[in-house]
């Protein structure tokens, strides 16, 4: 699959930006699940952990799309 621009209402958008938005939504859901089950107190640096989860989700989306 080639990563070509996507036409959204006449504006060409890079596919990575749509993947980044999708990864952000998935990360928000995972963060809410972790706070619901109280997993956050077990992490050393919560912001760094959320960033690492975001990068892992984004990487997975890019690998699946490619």
Image (cartoon, grey):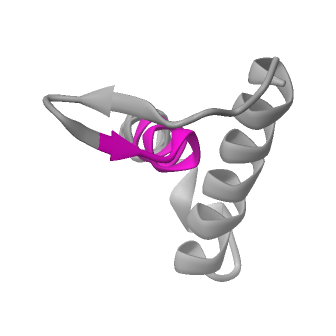
Residue at the location (86% across, 30% down)?
63
Looking at the picture, tell me which residue is in the foreground, 4 or 52: 4
Boundaries of the magenta span: 12-24
Q: Which quarter of the figure has residue 11? A: top left
Residue at the location (78% across, 44% down)?
59
Residue at the location (64% across, 78% down)?
48
Q: Main secondary structure of the magenta part?
A: helix
Query: Residue 62, position in %: x, y?
Result: 75, 35
Q: Which quarter of the figure has residue 4? A: top right
Query: Residue 52, position in %: x, y?
Result: 71, 64
Residue at the location (78% across, 26% down)?
2
Query: Residue 15, position in %: x, y?
Result: 54, 39
Point out the image quarter for the C terminus: top right
Q: Going by the image, does 24 lie left or right of 39?
A: left
Q: Is residue 19 above or below residue 49?
A: above
Point out the image quarter for the N terminus: top right
Query: Residue 65, position in %: x, y?
Result: 75, 21
| 17 inside magenta stretch | yes
Looking at the picture, tell me which residue is in the foreground, 14 or 23: 14
In the picture as drawn, the residue positioned furthest to the front comes out as 10
Q: Going by the image, does 56 lie left or right of 37?
A: right
For the image shown, how many numbered marks are present on the structure?
Answer: 0
Looking at the picture, tell me which residue is in the foreground, 22 or 36: 22
| 41 inside magenta stretch | no
């Amino acid at each position: 699959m080639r990563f070509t621009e996507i036409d959204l209402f006449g504006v060409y958008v890079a596919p990575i930006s749509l993947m980044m938005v999708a990864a952000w939504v998935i990360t928000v859901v995972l963060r809410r699940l972790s706070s619901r089950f109280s997993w956050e107190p077990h992490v050393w640096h919560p912001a760094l952990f959320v960033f690492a989860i975001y990068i892992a989700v984004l990487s997975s989306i890019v690998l699946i799309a490619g």
